[in-house]
């Protein structure tokens, strides 16, 4: 049994300690927002917050995640009320297929937590490890720049 | 011949398209699928407009064999044109039939938010009161009057939030990857090192119950209830597998040279159609050769599918663009009756054409057959996705022209060499273009590639110029034997053909000592093309400095798009940075303005990525670009400002727009690089190395 601090709750999971966090979240915790894209820290789709900082969960072993406060996309909304970052992305249609969206939203949330008025450069730097194949980047950037105003 | 939309001719039963539910909601069905392009939202808006109801009242049901109308493949930017037209007409009929129930003169009635009012009615009524729970039992044989576009309230506006997006931003597991069933097995496939390796031996004794594994020919699968364990098993079994290489991949010649050396057949295009006659032998004074390498679809989520075989009935959850095609392919490969196979569409990551979704679907079905009664969720690895997906084919385009004394083009030649752009499942053929089928003991060989001779198909898509040129010869040069597996990549041949045409137009403008916009306008007669070109120039405030322009009409019959690109080229590193893109488009009647803009912009950004960064790398022994480090794509820090303007033409038919900007963007980018550097880069990708080579020419 490993104890995880996940989205403000403490939960116990049964998985081998070397299992990457992304697998544990998806298959043991019902956290489907975390997407597997490359399993090599190259695409950002699996990003979660560990102690408020965005990290790829595809290579982070369960044993190394247990001491940290984890937040996923599911933890950003307060009940039905989306976080400001989620709402900005949604109302701007800042997505196409949406496979990369969760990782981007989580990273952007962390950015706005640390800086309520990020610049264009702050935004693209925060998202530079996130690949999007649909080309929705301009809308993501515009949505977040609007929010930063 | 009926002038009904084709989808309604195939499925005339109105109840297959629309149903009024007891709770007042309206179910509208489409055979097209959501790929991230926003089609379900477009269908919802079209239905809401025609019925005069709130869009929220419409629930769109998509793609399940035997349930929704069969609309073949979601491809070619055809969904708004075909399914949209069918849904509009079906809704017009539904409206007419419902109003006829309550009035002898239904044209006098008004509908607002689904509430019906007007002369002859004792009290307002509603669609729900008239029709809830009752099927229409009506066959559409003739078209009925549709709503006058001047009365549109919903279409053409940009205030719609995509209906599939809220679940995604909340993290609801809507993707095939997220499926979960009780007692489910996770499956992984162990692939050979290349197309030309076959299995010699593999040791599966390390797999112990309850885990499962099986070998069939060179097809190896492992399954476990624990997903991570399945990946570990796949790795350890893969490490133990011994393969024999049957031959090498031809990898020594540069692709443009390979294409010319291996030409199979040539077809001059006359009256829009390739003809089996010898091309004329023509000599031109100005000549240039352009090329692109193989490109990946590069879906962000590796391909996946689920399958479940119970009592001889196979249910498959698939992100395929063509659920009926894959259903019949499964029937052929598994020797099952297609009636016993049910395919339910479920979203994968964006596919941008024919990626490995069909391959994964077959893999899942094979695993489900090996574990009858158990639901199986099969996923590809990133490395397999990069190595085994069918790539967008390499292309070579040779352009030639003569200019008149006035500086007009009076002879134009366009020769385009490429491999087959269509490797979709083709049930009933002798071969099968599915990876697993090549590896099974009782499998299939790949189909012999054949040139497509229809209007605007694969290689010669957009090979005909949009420009008025009195004497022109456009030749499709088909190359059968591709070193790498290929299929349809978004826009097919159009991207490279338009890249070549639009680059060459600038080269000719320079030779004619005319600015590129004036030179284009002198060769244009199509007023919509002219309007789009002028609009983008206006939007950008001119095309001077380090800017370039590109123009095309997709397939010469769908959406018009013009693009201006602005670049900065680092004189030391020769790296190209795109700072700004301006896009103008005419897609006829606009359905969802923001959705349309999203497609135009996404296509443009994807084209920048292709042009600046991408090339499938391979050697004699296999594909060497197996991850995002070895196959880089455009990143957030490399994204330009993008401004888009759409010319709405509500009285005209909607034109598919999902593939409209790739070609014009590619041409605009190459032209901008020339404007900035005087280097004419003709070989994709426009990397520092290719810029230096072009500068040395």
Image (tube, rainbow, N blue to C red):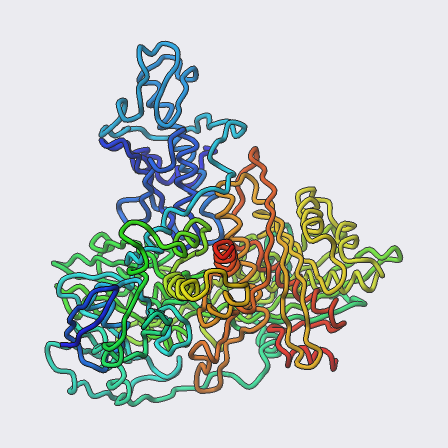
Expressed as whole percent of the image width and height from the top left, the position of residue B553 reads 61, 51
- Above or below, B220 against B532 in this view is below
- Above or below, B193 against A107 in this view is below
Residue B572 figure quarter:
bottom right
Apparent side of residue B267 relative to residue B9 in the rendered image (left or right): right
Q: Residue at x 34, y 89 (%)?
A: B244
Q: Residue at x 65, y 78 (%)?
A: B690
Q: Residue at x 73, y 45 (%)?
A: B525
Residue B299 figure quarter:
bottom left
Please, which residue is most extreme toward the right here? B405
Q: Is residue B640 visible?
A: yes
Apparent side of residue B369 relative to residue A77 in the rendered image (left or right): left
Observer-nearest residue: A61 or B475?
A61
Q: Residue at x 48, y 33 (%)?
A: B3
Q: Count every numbered label the image shows and give the total.
A: 0
Observer-nearest residue: B117 or B326?
B117
Observer-nearest residue: B321 or B154?
B154
Apparent side of residue B10 relative to residue A128 in the rendered image (left or right): left
Expressed as whole percent of the image width and height from the top left, the position of residue B179 reads 24, 61
Expressed as whole percent of the image width and height from the top left, the position of residue A43 reads 41, 72
Apparent side of residue B566 relative to residue B314 in the rendered image (left or right): right
Q: Is residue B602 visible?
A: no
Expressed as whole percent of the image width and height from the top left, the position of residue B533 reads 69, 49
Observer-nearest residue: B441 or B560?
B560
The quarter of the image holding the C terminus of chain B is: bottom right
């Amino acid at each position: 049994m490993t104890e995880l601090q996940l989205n403000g709750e403490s939960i116990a999971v049964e998985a081998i300690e070397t299992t990457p966090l992304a697998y544990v979240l998806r298959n043991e915790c019902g956290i489907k927002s975390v997407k597997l894209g490359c399993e090599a820290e190259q695409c950002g789709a699996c990003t979660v917050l560990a102690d408020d900082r965005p990290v790829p969960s595809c290579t982070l072993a369960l044993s190394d995640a247990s001491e940290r406060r984890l937040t996923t996309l599911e933890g950003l909304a307060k009940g039905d009320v989306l976080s400001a970052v989620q709402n900005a992305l949604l109302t701007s249609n800042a997505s196409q297929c949406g496979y990369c969206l969760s990782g981007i939203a989580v990273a952007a949330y962390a950015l706005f937590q640390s800086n309520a008025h990020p610049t264009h450069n702050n935004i693209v730097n925060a998202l530079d490890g996130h690949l999007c194949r649909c080309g929705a980047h301009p809308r993501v950037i515009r949505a977040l720049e609007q929010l930063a105003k | 011949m009926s002038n009904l939309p084709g989808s309604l001719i195939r499925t005339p039963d109105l109840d297959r398209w629309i149903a009024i539910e007891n709770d007042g909601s309206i179910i509208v069905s489409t055979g097209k699928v959501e790929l991230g392009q926003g089609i379900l939202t477009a269908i919802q808006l079209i239905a809401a407009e025609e019925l005069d109801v709130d869009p929220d009242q419409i629930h769109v049901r998509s793609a399940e064999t035997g349930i929704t109308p069969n609309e073949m493949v979601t491809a070619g930017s055809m969904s708004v044109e075909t399914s949209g037209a069918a849904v509009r007409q079906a809704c017009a009929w539904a409206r007419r039939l419902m109003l006829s129930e309550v009035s002898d003169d239904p044209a006098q009635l008004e509908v607002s938010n689904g509430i019906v009012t007007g002369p002859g009615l004792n009290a307002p009524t509603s669609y729900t009161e008239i029709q809830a729970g009752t099927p229409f039992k009506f066959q559409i044989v003739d078209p009925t009057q549709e709503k006058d576009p001047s009365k549109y309230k919903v279409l053409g506006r940009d205030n719609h939030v995509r209906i599939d997006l809220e679940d995604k931003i909340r993290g609801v597991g809507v993707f095939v990857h997220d499926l979960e069933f009780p007692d489910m097995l996770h499956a992984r496939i162990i692939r050979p090192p290349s197309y030309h390796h076959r299995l010699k031996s593999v040791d599966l004794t390390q797999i112990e119950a309850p885990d499962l594994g099986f070998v069939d020919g060179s097809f190896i699968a492992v399954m476990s209830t624990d997903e991570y364990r399945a990946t570990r098993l796949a790795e350890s079994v893969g490490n133990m597998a011994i393969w024999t290489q049957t031959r090498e991949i031809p990898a020594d010649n540069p692709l443009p040279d390979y294409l010319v050396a291996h030409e199979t057949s040539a077809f001059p295009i006359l009256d829009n159609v390739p003809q089996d006659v010898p091309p004329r032998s023509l000599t031109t004074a100005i000549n240039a050769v352009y090329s692109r390498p193989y490109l990946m679809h590069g879906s962000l989520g590796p391909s996946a599918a689920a399958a479940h075989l119970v009592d001889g009935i196979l249910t498959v959850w698939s992100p395929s663009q063509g659920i009926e095609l894959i259903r019949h392919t499964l029937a052929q490969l598994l020797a099952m009756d297609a009636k016993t196979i049910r395919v339910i569409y479920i979203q994968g990551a964006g596919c941008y054409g024919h990626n490995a979704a069909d391959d994964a679907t077959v893999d899942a079905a094979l695993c489900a057959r090996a574990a009858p009664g158990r639901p199986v969720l099969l996923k590809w690895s990133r490395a397999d996705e990069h190595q085994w997906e069918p790539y967008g084919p390499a292309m070579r385009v040779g352009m030639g022209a003569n200019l008149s004394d006035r500086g007009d083009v009076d002879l134009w030649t366009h020769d385009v060499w490429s491999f087959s752009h269509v490797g979709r499942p083709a049930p009933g053929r002798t071969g099968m273009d599915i990876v697993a089928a090549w590896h099974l003991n009782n499998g299939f060989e790949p189909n012999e590639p054949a040139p497509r001779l229809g209007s605007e198909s694969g290689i010669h898509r957009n090979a005909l110029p949009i420009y008025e040129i009195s004497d022109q010869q456009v030749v499709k040069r088909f190359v059968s034997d591709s070193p790498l597996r290929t299929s349809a990549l978004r826009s097919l041949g159009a991207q490279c053909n338009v890249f070549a045409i639009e680059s060459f137009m600038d080269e000719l403008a320079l030779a004619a000592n005319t600015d590129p916009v004036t030179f284009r306008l002198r060769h244009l007669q199509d007023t919509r093309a002219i309007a789009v070109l002028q609009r983008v120039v206006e939007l950008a405030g001119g095309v001077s400095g380090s800017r370039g322009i590109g123009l095309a009409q997709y397939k010469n019959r769908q959406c018009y798009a013009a693009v201006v690109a602005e670049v900065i080229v680092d004189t030391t590193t020769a790296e190209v940075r795109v700072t700004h893109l301006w896009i103008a488009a005419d897609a006829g009647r606009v359905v969802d303005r923001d959705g349309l803009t999203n497609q135009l912009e996404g296509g443009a950004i994807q084209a920048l990525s292709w042009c600046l960064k991408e090339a499938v790398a391979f050697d004699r022994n296999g594909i060497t670009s197996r991850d995002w480090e070895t196959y880089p794509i455009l990143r957030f820090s490399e994204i330009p400002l993008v401004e888009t303007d759409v010319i709405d033409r509500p009285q005209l038919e909607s034109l598919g727009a999902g593939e409209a900007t790739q070609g014009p963007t590619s041409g605009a980018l190459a032209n901008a690089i020339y404007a900035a550097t005087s280097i004419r880069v003709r070989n994709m990708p426009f990397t520092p190395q290719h810029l230096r080579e072009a500068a040395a020419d």
